[in-house]
Image: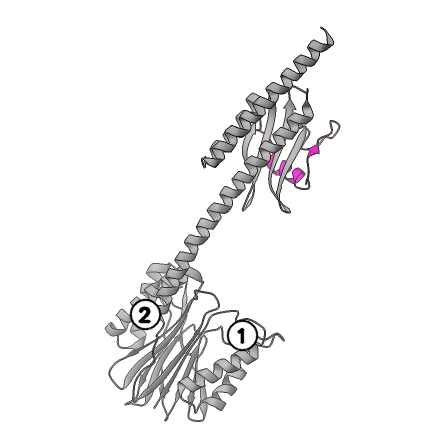
Amino acid sequence: MSRELKILEKLEKEINLKELQIKSLLTITQAINDNVNADDLFQMYRSFLSWEMGIKRMLLYVKESDGWDCVSHINGEFVNHDTIVEAINPIKRLFVVKEEEATALKDFDIIIPVYHKDFPIAYSLIGGIKDKEDLYNKIQFITTITNIIAVAIENKRLFKQQIEQERLNKDMELAKEVQKMLIPQTSLDSNYFDIDFIYQPHSSIGGDYVDFIQFGEKKLCACIADISGKGVAAALLMANFQAMLQSLIYQYRDLETFIYALNEAVFRITRSDRFITFFIAEIDAQKKEMRYINAGHYPPYLLNGNELVELKNGTTVIGAFEKLPEIKETIIELKHEALLFCFTDGLPDLKNDKEEYFDEEMIQEFMRKEGKQDTKGFNETLMNVLIEHKGKSNFIDDIAILTCKML
């Protein structure tokens, strides 16, 4: 064969290869533009390598949230993926496997990593290229196709993640609105009681709850709760909890029976997966007494004249057990302008940049010092003190506060 003929044949092969490459590139690009799903793209990649490029072995790994997933392969049914993933992780550029290397990669010729910025998003392992002629150009084109496929899949993943995040944000906004409706927005207009609230959420949706229920002019129930967990689930449980509380409190006027019934209602929903710490006090201005039950909640304080009482008697948390153990209701005779101060554990857990907590001693000291104020002034002063105490540190948990004074 003449030299000129050989050159022509070589040129013809190169032209045919280029035409094949352009056709394949256009086909895959069009599929991406048509938003073909990931599985179909993987199948196109497999067919391109197998039928058009004559590849005998291939593994394609893409990055998932929990590790690497082999999404397409040619003759890769029996490989040990864990061993291969461990071997390819250090590879950051096109890697040629040496024949003498007896490693997990020995059945492959080249490893093609695909990076997005500094993070790997895909690896393609290629082995058994039949036609070695013009090998460099073939590898370059396989690398190009691999990059296109991997980036398209990563974009699909990021888009799906964005959609899920937007859906979550909408759910969070809805739960936030639900939560706003559950927290009292106005104080009580009464000649016998002065009541005020603080609600300082750590995130957009917290698990704290405060409320009051008035029975006539001279009797009031004040309560505070902390629901385990955060987010939408906590907000939904809070909504259910408020509905159950508002319904049962009118059915069972004695606190012990009410707490038993409330626990059974919550347990039917949570099946002990979640629980609620709860404190409720019934204040009777005519009898000048307070009845209370503490169900596993951080003990509130009662400034009763010059005496500061820790309100810790009651039972265990709500919703953790189908039946509560013994419940102890406590009755306290109230003195003039007795001050009830309830809070969730976000208050004593608040610390400053010196790791100093706003602990029980500081709470008691503040109550003794500021307890003569009305509840609004008391709470406003407290928030100023908390902001000063935490300094540059953040609120690490929700803080809910209920302050009630008998006039």
Residue 373 figure quarter = bottom left
Residue shown at the point (34%, 85%) measured from the top left: 290
Q: Nearer the viewer, residue 138 or 394?
A: 138
Asked if residue 151 lies left or right of residue 36, the reply is right
In the displayed structure, would residue 127 be above or below residue 378? above
Residue shown at the point (54%, 83%) measured from the top left: 362
| Residue 47 picture location, percent across and down | 53, 25
Q: Nearer the viewer, mark 2 or mark 1?
A: 1
Residue shown at the point (30%, 67%) measured from the top left: 243
Residue 289 figure quarter = bottom left
- Residue at numbered disc 2: 260
Q: Nearer the viewer, residue 171 or 252?
A: 171
Answer whether residue 90 is magenta in the image. yes
The secondary element bearing badge 2 is classed as: helix
In the displayed structure, would residue 76 be above or below residue 385? above
Discs 2, 1 touching: Cβ within 8 Å: no
Asked if residue 44 lies left or right of residue 238, the reply is right
Quarter of the image with the C terminus is bottom left
| Residue 26 picture location, percent across and down | 52, 29
Q: Characterize the local packing of mark 1: few (<14), some (14-19) or many (20 or more) Cα atoms within 10 angstroms.
A: many
First along the sequence among labels 2 and 1: 2
Q: Nearer the viewer, residue 391 or 195?
A: 391
Q: Which mark is residue 350?
A: 1
Residue 312 visible? The answer is: no
Residue shown at the point (67%, 15%) measured from the top left: 10
Q: Which residues are magenta?
A: 76-99
The amino acid pointed to by label 2 is Tyr
| Residue 313 picture location, percent across and down | 41, 78
The secondary element bearing badge 1 is classed as: loop
